[in-house]
Amino acid sequence: PSVVPSRLLTAGNDGTICHWDLTSTSVQTGAPKLVCQSRNKKGGLHSGGIFSMDVSFHSSGGGNDSGQEGTPPSNNVWIATGSKDKSIAITMLDSTLDVPLWRSNFHRGKVGCVAFSSSSYSSNPLVASASDDGVVAIHDARLDGTK
């Protein structure tokens, strides 16, 4: 049996992340329900467009508290983003999309690619990034993101 996704994450050139519920739509527009959206510009994750995003599911040792079969609890979903503002951010999928768990300003050019390590299912993920500055880097979120 195929699995139909019920949630969607999008990242935009306005520097925001949007979390959509695909099971609920507007009667007027037919658009999916917007569950939450990060702020853009000042006070948000990025001051420029988000050009790359990756998602990692982390097990907390507990059960599924999301209320939907096959959907991880939102507080166990980590999101890494890379931006035109030259920064990388990690946040969690919950009501605080604007609050980064970790941020790096390591790069000197637009960050066009980010990816969690395939073995980053612990509480301290590794994130790879590639930038227009010509550098590919591996970041340990346990460390200061400025180094």
Image (cartoon, rainbow, N blue to C red):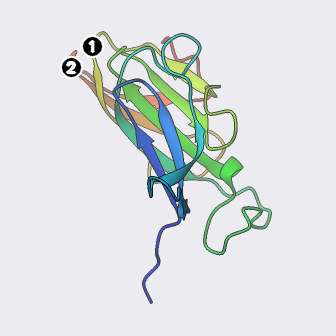
Q: Residues within 10 Å of mark 1 (few under 14, many from 20)?
A: some
Is residue 120 visible in the rendered image? The answer is no
Answer yes or no: do the residues labelled 1 and 2 have beta carbons within 8 Å? Answer: yes
Q: Position of residue 3 (x, y in %)?
A: 47, 78
Q: Provide the secondary structure element on which disc 2 rests.
A: loop
Q: Position of residue 126 (x, y in %)?
A: 49, 38
Is residue 65 visible in the rendered image? The answer is yes
In the rendered image, the vertical position of residue 146 relative to residue 13, given as above or below? above
What's the residue at 61%, 33% (across, down)?
Answer: 97
In the image: residue 83, left or right of residue 90: left
Q: Position of residue 139 (x, y in %)?
A: 46, 28
In the rendered image, the vertical position of residue 111 relative to residue 65, given as above or below? above
Where does label 1 land, which residue?
109
Q: Residues within 10 Å of mark 2 (few under 14, many from 20)?
A: some
Quadrant of residue 44 within the rendered picture = top right
Q: Position of residue 22 (x, y in %)?
A: 51, 61
In the image: residue 48, left or right of residue 67: left
Q: Provide the secondary structure element on which disc 1 rests.
A: loop
What's the residue at 64%, 28% (across, down)?
Answer: 101
What's the residue at 59%, 13% (across, down)?
Answer: 43
Q: Please, what is the three-letter code of the amino acid marked with disc 2? A: Asp
Where does label 2 land, which residue?
132
CA gap, disc 1 and disc 2: 5 Å
Quadrant of residue 142 within the rendered picture = top right
